[in-house]
Amino acid sequence: MHIYSLSENLKELNSNLINIIKIVTLDDLALSISNDEHGTVLFTQDDLPDMLKLSSYDSAKNSRFICIGKDLNAEDRLVLLNNNIEFIAPDKFARLSDLFFKVDPYIQKHKVLLVEDDESQIMITEHILENADIEVKSISKGEEVLDALTSFKPDLVLMDLYLEGITGDKLVKVIRKVPKFRFIPIVFLTADTTESSRMQVLNAGADDLLTKPINAKLLVAALKNRMQRSILYQSNASQSDSVAHDVGESENQLLNNFLNTNNSNNEASIIWIKVNNQQGLLKKLGYSGFKNLCKNLYNSLPSYDNNFIMKLELLDGVFAFGSENLNRVNSQIWLEKILKWLTKNYFSINGNDYHLNITSIILADIPKKKKMENLVRKAENILIDSETKQSINFLDEGSEDKQFYFTKRQIEESIKSRNFKWLYQSIIATKDESQEIYQLALQILTKSGENLATKEYYDVAEKSNLLGVLDRFTLEHAIRVIRLGEQKGHKTIALTNQTFSNFESKQLRNKNLTTINKLKLPHGSLIFQFNMKNAQEKISLLPEIARDFNNVGIGVCLSHFDCSTIAWKIARKLHTKWVRLSPQTKAKEFDSETFESLKKTINKAHTLGYKVIVSKVDSAKLAADLWKLNIDYLQGDFIQAPTKKY
């Protein structure tokens, strides 16, 4: 597997890949792809048009295209999604190892060795697998298996449980005794579904047992899943000089071996440790100094009488430790001791002393875990992306993890198919009835016919960098609603939720706002609603963003407004037009104290030039009380389409 790049900058950005990435011209890259050479193509946003042409080649289906960049607007992000091109931010790319790029199991043609002595069963299985683009070699005798493994080099062995002259569990033991075949997946296909048979082969070292008669889709899915996981685990690491283990075994092989060996050991655990203050140390020490510091830490961490049979230095500042007798509780105790040890110890380089802080992840209760490869990948993502600020984290299978990736797929499928639905929540102006005001809410339509409301997909879309794409579609629809009002001869105001991802960069902001300005929408007809928490994170940029919004006639609504000092400060910096009071500010019935407090808030907002909106008004009494308080806008849960449906 080759890694190509058109840019020398990408090669220099990641020191782990500096000797692996091959710099080529566009013509050379096109030639390699047309010759059906498998590889990973790294490129920047500037090269996107050329890469779109190359990725459309039939021969490019076996290559992996990855765009490295930042400030990617929603339109370009959508283009990448539609063309199955991955996207990685530069800071994350700079920390990735070659394992991320070396093998892509999803595009590699798989090879299966079929061990079966029934001719009719061989024909059926070969037909199913070959139709799924899997290369198959069949043998009928158990004694031929080692020679076939050596010559054919399969990604998986699929065998019958009972062969002439030998049973499956004995054949597995024969295979596992050979070091180079220790990690190859072995799956049994049999009509014997008894629990004793399953345990017999699994205890011998097999990975799975499927039943006859064959379900074609299930068979292909199960085998591909096993092979993909195995290829990921067995990718060879290139930085052997910084790894403390036997020559010839990669980090992932050792990790996989540890998990396989301890798949029934309740006392086993893996602990990952990452140096948290890496960026600051790199600035002070440079790369070589930081690398030496990490080696010093790795070699000096006390074991406190614990036996670690696996010790790996995965990347500079990222380590993994495996113990066969350190359970969940004791792993935490050990890490707590390490944290205390770090507060009392420092590391000296060039006469200067440095303290370190760490993030750690514990994978314990291994026999109870089902999706082990997902958990290991989750640990790697946390370590790379620094998703948690906690010092000690437990890696567990939770329904929320499965739901996250399931929802992410639903969002991506909906974006590719433009399968959306919009709800129109009517907003009532208490002083002016000459205009229609709607808040647009986007719902995602899934293949199963479900509707995902904003609260069901928002967090997943935000963490997956897809929220800006959805915002783009909602904005386009809001413009159509405004245009319809113009055609009917009255003013329509469309309020749409937005995040700062499409406006944070000045270059992207100018591009998006220039497009909106060319539409010549009625002034004030388009209102962007921003969450106060999101605005607080970008507080230094707010005056500049607000000025650019005002120049093209876009109003701003600040939601979840809690009337705190920082809330008023943000409203001023963002040149807010509307403030939407937070749920804590509202009540079904107002007592005298709440009434007076809310009255002061509304008066202050009006003095500063802000209009006030209260949502979830679901009773006549509440509406009447708010009316007395001189509120500007009321919004209930009533859903109503504009003058014309879309």
Image: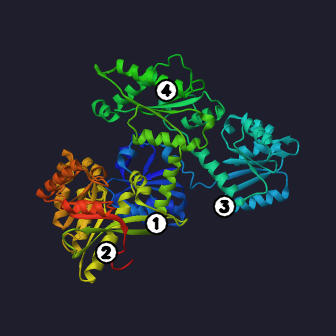
Nearest to the observer: residue 363 or residue 642: 642
Amino acid at the residue labelled 4 = Gln
Q: Earlier in the sequence, mark 4 or mark 2?
A: 4
User: Residue 416: which numbered mark, if any?
Assistant: 1
Look at discs 4 and 2 and give the one toward the viewer.
Answer: 2
**Does dot 4 land on a helix, a strand or a loop?**
helix
Nearest to the observer: residue 162 or residue 113: 162
| Left or right of residue 103, residue 629 in this image | left
Residue topped by disc 4: 332
Amino acid at the residue labelled 3 = Ala
Quadrant where the C terminus is found in the figure: bottom left
Query: Whole-Å distance between the Cαs marked 4 and 1?
Result: 44 Å
Residue topped by disc 2: 481
Picture residue at 49% right of the left edge, 26% below the top: 332
Q: Which of marks 4 and 1 is nearer the N terminus?
A: 4
Q: Which residue lies furthest to the top in this view?
A: 305
**Does dot 3 land on a helix, a strand or a loop?**
loop
| Left or right of residue 108, residue 495 in this image | left
Query: Whole-Å distance between the Cαs marked 4 and 3?
Result: 45 Å
Residue topped by disc 3: 132
Q: Position of residue 230 (x, y in %)?
A: 61, 44
Query: Whole-Å distance between the Cαs marked 3 and 1?
Result: 25 Å
Q: Position of residue 413 (x, y in %)?
A: 49, 63
**Does dot 1 land on a helix, a strand or a loop?**
helix
Q: Specify few, some or many for label 1: CA neighbours under 10 Å numbering under 14, 14-19, or 20 or more.
A: few
| Left or right of residue 468, residue 603 in this image | left
Amino acid at the residue labelled 2 = Val
Q: Specify few, some or many for label 2: CA neighbours under 10 Å numbering under 14, 14-19, or 20 or more.
A: many
